[in-house]
Amino acid sequence: MHKSRLMTTFFLLPAFFLFGLSLPVFAQPEREMTTLKMFYDEDDIVVTPTRYPKSISRVAENVTVITADDIKAINAHSLADVLYYVPGVSVQVSGGPGSAPNVFMQGSNTRHILLLIDGVPQNNLADIYPDVGAVPVQAIERIEIIKGPASSTWGSSLGGVINVITKSPDETRKFGGVVSSSIGERNTGDYRGEVSGKVAGVGYYLSGGGLLSDGLLPHNGFHGGNLYTKLKYSPTDRADLTFALGYNRGAREIGEVPLFGVSFDDDYQYIFTTLGLAYTIANDLSLEFTLRSSWRDNEQRQNDLLTGLSLGGIDYSEQNFGAGAKLVWTPRGHEVVLGTDFDSGHLESTAVTDGKQRLEKWAIFLNDTVSLGDFSLTPGLRYDHTSTNGDFWSPSMGVTFAPWESTVLRAFVARGFSTPPLFFTFGDGFYSMSNPNLKMESVWSYSLGMETTLLRYAWLKTTLFRHDISDLVGGLQLADGRFTYVNQGKQRRQGVEVEVKTMPVFNTSLTIGYAFVDATDRETGAIIPLVARNTYDVGILYDDRKSFRASLKGHYTQWNGEVADNGKSTAMIWDFSVTKKLLTFNVDRQSSVETFFSAHNLFNGAQYPAFPFRNPRRWFEGGVRIFF
């Protein structure tokens, strides 16, 4: 990290804020991006980049949006199933529904990705693992993904952000919902239900479900259930109260390693709540408060493969309490967001020093979106303080330019970080030694992008990116045979993403995605192993918008693993899904019955970075949904 570059940024950002506030009298109307909007299912508004809704044509970051319709088209079970097809995001599949895959973004480590549900962090304290396999999809309204650091808005997020935005109550009627059931091979079943409406001035949404499987691979079973509810009440025209509660539990069989005669299990239980108040002070001024809490229990076990007897394991118990406040001011030509976050986390485990540790952190952030006709500027700055690994300043600057109503050009530079997991800082056991002097892992990130519909019937998006990472945490072998974690690495991850989507022709549309990641050690020049170097995605969707929809998707990942890992990337994985509406009831046509069917890995392709954690072979499932 060059101090001169950081100090220059600190001086320039306040100057941009002050300069921007002097510009409203010169601001011009925003260009209407009508052709780009044709490729977004509902609108082009996103909230994750600045924590305030704005048009994607004013977003400088590399953002991908996934809707509930996209999720339903592939009959997904969990968030992991959805992320599998996102260019620039790589999911290491190691089992069937409910499994615990690793997720990577533009070559970043799994722990560098921040997982949010409605803006509330979901990563655990012990190893900061984003468990995308444990997030059910039925309550998801949309997913917003930022590829690259978003620390000036969200704090610890060196690799990127996945923000799951849940469904809100349907306040247009008193009662409605959907129930669904599916069955597949190896006793795989997914059973869901959700209801929504508004009664006595209170909007409600409630969903629940269960996912079961005997396992598509050896020692790969899963049994779990989930519940989620959201209530909304507006005591006045200016105030909204929102309460949400989620509960999730599961028993996993992670897999087995015959060479060492062991298998692994993972049982988890998780509950989280949020309470929010949004108040409109004036037409251009609003205030929002949020309280949040969560409890998590996790048991990881290692078993003897022959006898099934436990060989020991680690238990984790976590409690988190937090609060946030946000003031939004929107004078002409500006969207100014000033906010603060506070979180207090407590971890109890035999794997950490003294059997318990805590992480307390607070932050203050400020960003502005300055609209200047065809241009927009987005300066951002955030200061984070932690009780474990010190402080961090995260500046960012984004620029967008719309030379035509069909095209947006983007440039973005940011400094980001990730807080080391508590186990890295305080892990102390038979095999490990704590290192309380660990520093934040940091990155300087740069990206250039273009999004256009100049091709008459097609949408094209391309992004060049570069991430220079310093103080990367890695394991160090000690003289007594134990290991500890130290800041020892410098890496560069750079590459390109390309996405193409066509307009429907005869109800059929085509999507193509490609991502290339070159990950190297900045000191030695060596290639970093186990990174998804090349990924390809192909999709064909037929949708008559009435009663029939079919999807064929292909995905290929070239994992640059070591020869000793015995990985395979020999074929593209093809998945086929079809949905047919059978019946429609009522005049409003809101009640209907549809059936669906999916065939996974049609041609038995093998695609995994290391043996024995393989991807499942070909398997089938089908089911029915009833809307009422």
Image (tube, rainbow, N blue to C red):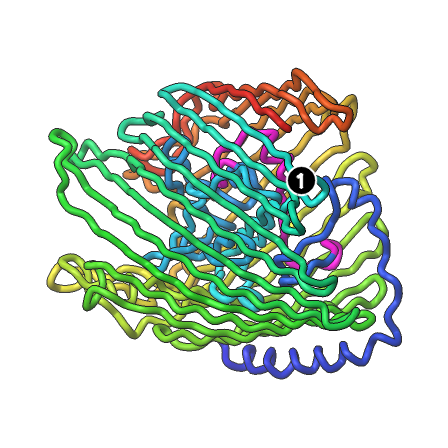
In-front residue for pair 581/363: 581
Residue in the image at 44% along x and 57% along y: 112
- Assess whether residue 76 is covered by the magenta stretch: yes
In-front residue for pair 275/507: 275
Residue in the image at 40% along x and 74% along y: 386
Residue in the image at 72% along x and 54% along y: 56
Residue in the image at 59% along x and 62% along y: 446
Residue 542 lies in quadrant:
top right
In-front residue for pair 547/261: 547
Circle 1 sits on which residue? 174
Task: Tell me residue 102's x, y (percent).
Answer: 40, 44
Image: magenta residue range: 55-81
Residue 3, visible in the rendered structure: yes
Q: Is residue 14 left or right of residue 25?
A: left
Q: Residue furthest front?
A: 200
Which quadrant of the figure contains the C terminus? top right
| Circle 1: residue type | Lys
Residue 572 to residue 240: above or below: above
- Assess whether residue 153 is covered by the magenta stretch: no
Residue 133 lies in quadrant:
top left
